[in-house]
Amino acid sequence: MTRILIAHDHALIREGIRNILLHLTDFEVAGEAADAAGTIALVRSTQAHVLILDASIAGHTGVELIREIGEINQGIQVLVLTMNGDEQYAMRAFEAGASGYLTRESASGELIGALMTIASGGLYMGVAMAGQIGRNPPEPVEALPHRRLSKREFDVFRRITAGERIGEIATQLCVSTKTVSTYKARILEKMRMPHGTALVRYAMRHRLFDDSEEP
């Protein structure tokens, strides 16, 4: 029996997914959540094999939430359900640890097929997205400048693009302002950017931290 968690901020969509799985003997809906905090709590408290995750769920950006879920429970597989048909976002979701990616226009049969594939340890890319990527291959994720950053540098990069000041970042990370300035200099050097404004533009262009990007 494959235990499924559903995380979506629309009750009707949660109900629809639950009804699709209700009469299938191979699946059991083990829990539901309506926001990011509830999703994290659910993943911590409930044993399950697959999490169906609304990439734009309230309270968190989708990619960051996927990473956090992976840190909390490395055994659970994440199937992203999204309105976002952007190839680069799909690639970032997989880089963050997702095992599957479906856009919301996918048929119920494809959802079931995706769950079966993921539960057995495979990866699944929705038919519509796979076709789109085949027609327009995205730039390899590894080639993007922000992929050169360490985990801490990426965190500082995220905070800078969110508008946090050096002092605020230092306080949040419990380091000195000099250390944060050093991180910023390394980020600019690694990404070959002339100044902080260029970092913000880059993040906007690639939609790295935008809550409305659907994640």
Image: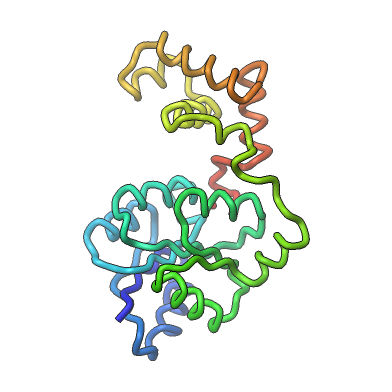
Q: Is residue 9 left or right of residue 172?
A: right
Give x and y (percent) for residue 157.
51, 27
Which residue is farthest right? 135
- Image height of 67 relative to 204, above or below: below
Q: Does 102 sit above or below residue 17?
A: above
Q: Is residue 199 left or right of residue 12?
A: right
Quadrant for the N terminus in the image: bottom left
Front one among 155 and 74: 74
59 lies above or below 42: above
Identify which residue is drawn at 54% across, 40% down.
Answer: 209
- Which picture quadrant has residue 152? top left
Furthest-left residue in view?
Answer: 45
The residue that appears at 47% across and 57% down in the rendered structure is 98
x then y, percent, for residue 84: 62, 58
Quadrant in the picture for residue 33: bottom left
Give the residue drawn at x 34%, y 19%.
171
Asked which colour scheme the image uses, the reply is rainbow
Q: Relative to residue 204, is residue 157 drawn left or right?
A: left
Residue shown at 27% from the left, 55% from the top: 41
| Viewer-proximal residue among 13 and 183 | 183
Compared across the picture, whether 136 is left or right of 159 comes to right
- Tell me where residue 10 appears, x and y as whole percent: 47, 67
Instruction: State the image quarter where residue 191 is shown.
Output: top right
Of residue 191 and residue 83, the one placed in the foreground of this image is: 191
Q: Position of residue 126 (x, y in %)?
A: 60, 69
